[in-house]
Image: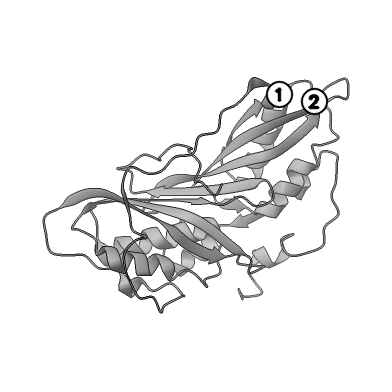
Amino acid sequence: MPPVTDPSLLSPLGKPTEYRATYAPDLLYPIPRQLKRDELGLTGTALPFVGEDLWNAYELSWLNPKGKPVVAVGTLRVPADSPNLIESKSLKLYFNSLNQTAFANTDAVVAALGADLSAAAGAPVIVELQSLGCRPAAQIGYPEGVLLDDLDIACDAYQPAPQLLATLDGPVVEETLYSHLLKSNCLVTGQPDWAMVVIRYRGRPLDRAGLLRYIVSFREHNEFHEQCVERIFCDISRHCRPEALAVHARYTRRGGLDINPFRSSGDFAALGNAREIRQ
């Protein structure tokens, strides 16, 4: 259980909630990233990574000027160097507050969301909405890389165990490794969070068995999605010292939202927004 000074304990997570159906930006609950970054020895002025948290929102609706509902899907891009992450249940509640609110058009909704989310994150958040009437297409994809999950390994660590990470002797390689076995738990409620994690790097070959055991070791760990990805990035950086590294996780949907944090040394771009099959 996190300390009582952790502001996440005061969030709407795990608490009975009254849903509000009219526009209420005050519902958004920001959580400072630095609290967990302190555990990793990171300072906001010298982060070892760049990146973003890509959110997909599937339950968006508002009223047009005649009171007729509009439904849409959306993407949000929150920069990794923003001082705050936005707690997911508060975002769901905020989106629900649009349901009985009239907007002139979709551009007005985008403007409102962009302003409110940027204020909560403390940095510009990019918002894109697509009306379902425009027939937006969903794409399910798999990384162009090596799936680790068929490795025949024994697992006995279920809290993060960076000591399992190692490199092998050999020339520098550049490769993409991925696994569907990442599971962590919500920092506040303990509910399970499931994800595919993708690791792209350049450096001495990673010990794949050790890497998979390390991924599995998050299985009973309580931390938000964004924090898990930053922990994985830092652990691989410190124990394996790759020349370049990117970590990308795609978490399964909850409450009409999925969260997909991406952290990179700057050498690799994000993979795009193809869904993991469980999303």
Q: Relative to 135, say whether 233 is above or below.
A: below
Q: Is residue 100 above or below residue 228?
A: above
Task: Give the image location of residue 214, x and y in percent.
Answer: 37, 68
**Residue 62 seen in the current view:** yes
Q: Residue at x 35, y 71 (%)?
A: 162
* Dot 1 and dot 2 residues touching (CB under 8 Å): yes
- The residue most toward the bottom is 156
What amino acid is labelled 2 in the image? Answer: Phe
Q: Which residue is mark 1?
A: 106
Count of numbered circles in the view = 2
Judging from the image, what secondary structure is the residue with disc 1 in? Answer: helix
| Residue annotated with mark 2 | 103
Describe residue 163's horizontal placement relative to residue 90 as left or right.
left
**Closest to the observer, 184 or 103:** 184
Is 106 above or below relative to 222? above
The image shows residue 142 at horizontal and vertical percentages of 41, 43
* Residue 157, image x, y percentages: 42, 77
Kind of residue sitting beneath label 1: Thr
Give the camera-side residue of 80 and 105. Answer: 105
User: How many other residues sit within 10 Å of disc 2, few (<14), some (14-19) or many (≥20)?
Assistant: some
C-alpha span from label 1 to label 2: 7 Å
Q: Residue at x 63, y 23 (%)?
A: 135
Instruction: Give the x, y percent position of residue 81.
Output: 48, 48
